[in-house]
Each structure stands twice: as structure tokens, then as C-alpha cells.
Image (tube, rainbow, N blue to C red):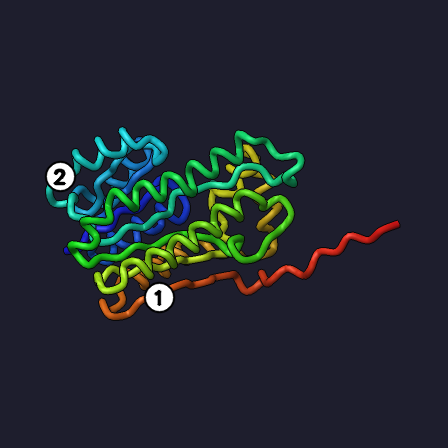
Amino acid sequence: MKTVLVTGATSGIGEACARAFAAAGWRVVGTGRRAERLHALAEALGPDRFQPCVFDVRDEAARDAALAGLPADFAQIDCLVNNAGLALGAAPAQQAELANWMTMIDTNVVALVSLTHRLLPGLIARKGSIVMLSSVAATYPYTGGNVYGGTKAFVRQFALGLRSDLSGTGVRVTSIEPGMVETEFTVVRNGGDQQASDSFYAGVNPLTGGDIAETVLWVASLPAHVNINTLEVMPVNQSFAGFQIAREG
């Protein structure tokens, strides 16, 4: 039985990934800051399928202590799903708060890189896999996307760089790049404003966390000789933005 570690498993895509992998027969280590949600997930999925691992991904000491305390059955990670991440604010750069930028960088880039480095020796030893959750924002800029888009472009390029460096090790690396997925993501981005999130997704029929979880599970379950490098996923009602033009006068 294989084991997957999913970061940000307390909601959205991460929680959906935990449920999908557990249903497919994997052991799941789910990380997050909200202990009550992780323990509820453990109760729902069962102790033989899900192990809660409570820490903030930005806290390396807490992370290492939690990983060191994993039961033996969950300690050997075969697949890392780097899902934890966030967007804060949607203001243009000249109006954005620097603290929001730094939190996005620390979470979406620094913590992701640090955890990947921490688990890499074991993943190489087991010829495992790494799935990065990037975003279409890595490719298509939009007003207010600034640092968030930059962090996701880093995630995409980091995945490609790992793919190159790990050639010959048997480790597979994939960047999955979703478009509009209705989760708590936009609520967080808008400072807890549920109405703003509901308005954003209204009438779009957006992707769900479950849609992306099934994609992640598919990638991780492919034969060992098959690697999906990058995979861009959008709802049918979302497409590429047109060019932005500012007119003088």
C-alpha cells in the first residue's frame, strides 16, 4: 500500500485529494493548521487510511517534529502533493499590501521548496512522485494577480526544473494548473467575504475540488514509466483572457 502526503488538506482541493486517495486504497498523511478539520477527516476516513499532521507549512521546526512523529505505517512517503497555498488580495501592485505579498511568497514558494527538499531523499529511494498545484495564473496574467501569479509561475518552473534534475531517478514530477475552482480560496483572498466569492463564481459552473483531486489521483496512479509534465485544467465557461489595452485621452 502506498502513502501520499497532501499539504493543505483541511479544505478545498487538499481535502478532496485526501478523500480521493483514501478511497483508492492509499494511506494519506494530511497536513494543515486547523487540527479540528484534520481530526474530523481522520474520523471520516478511518485511522488506517488517514493520519492528521498538524502544522503550518511555514514553520519548519513544527513540520519536522510532526513528520518525525508519524506512525511507521505512514512514515514512508511515496507521493507528495504540494497543494497548500493561497492568494491574498486582488488589488493592483501599486495598491497592494506588502504583508500579503510576503505571506504568499512564504507559503506558496518558500514552504513548498523546503518541504520538497525535506522529502526528496525518501521519494528518490522509493521512486515516488511529486505533484505541484500551480495555476493558470502562472501563464495568463490578470490585473491584481501580481505576486500570486508570480508564485505560481515559480511553482510551475520549479516542477520542470525538478523533472530535469531527477532524470534517471524514477521520480515523476507534474505541475497541475487549474483555472476557476470553487473552494474557500476566493473567500480567503477576499478577507473572508463569502458573498464576493459567490458572485465571482456565479453562473460559471466552475471546477470543484473533487475535479482536481481526481486529476491528481490519475496522475499519481499512472504506470511508473509515464510522466505528465504539465496539465492545464479549466471549466468550459472559462477561457483565455484577451489583451488588455489602455487608451489615451
Mark 2–mark 1 Cα distance, whole angstroms, equals 31 Å
Q: Locate residue 198 relative to residue 39 in the image: left or right.
A: right
Q: In which quarter of the image is residue 160?
A: bottom left
Relative to 164, is 111 above or below?
above
Disc 2, SS? loop
Relative to 169, is 193 above or below?
above
Q: Which residue lies at the image location 62% right of the left edge and 34% below the top edge?
A: 96
Q: Nearer the viewer, residue 81 or 45?
A: 81
Q: Locate residue 34 relative to residue 244 in the image: left or right.
A: left
Relative to 75, is 135 above or below?
below
Task: Count all numbered tags in the image, as a single digit.
Answer: 2
In this view, the mark in front (2 or 1): 1
Q: In which quarter of the image is residue 172?
A: bottom left
Dot 1 alpha-carbon crowd within 10 angstroms: few under 14, some 14 to 19, many 20 or more: some
Q: Nearer the viewer, residue 188 or 137?
A: 137
- In this view of the protein, can residue 34 be seen by the observer? no
- In this view of the protein, can residue 2 be seen by the observer? yes
Disc 1, SS? loop
Q: Locate residue 234 relative to residue 6 in the image: left or right.
A: right
Per the rendering, the mark at residue 228 is: 1
- Where is mark 2, residue-wise? 71
Q: Which residue lies at the image location 64% right of the left edge and 59% below the top edge?
A: 241
Q: Locate residue 118 relative to residue 158 in the image: left or right.
A: left
Dot 2 alpha-carbon crowd within 10 angstroms: few under 14, some 14 to 19, many 20 or more: few
Residue extending farthest to the front is: 165
Please state the horizontal and vertical placement of residue 15, each as a whole percent of the image.
35, 46
Which callout, 2 or 1, points at the residue further toward the start of the chain?
A: 2
Please state the horizontal and vertical placement of residue 20, each as a whole percent of the image.
30, 54
Amino acid type shown at disc 1: Ile
Amino acid type shown at disc 2: Pro
Q: Which residue lies at the image location 41% right of the left edge and 63% below the top edge?
A: 230
Please state the horizontal and vertical placement of residue 107, each as a whole percent of the image.
42, 38
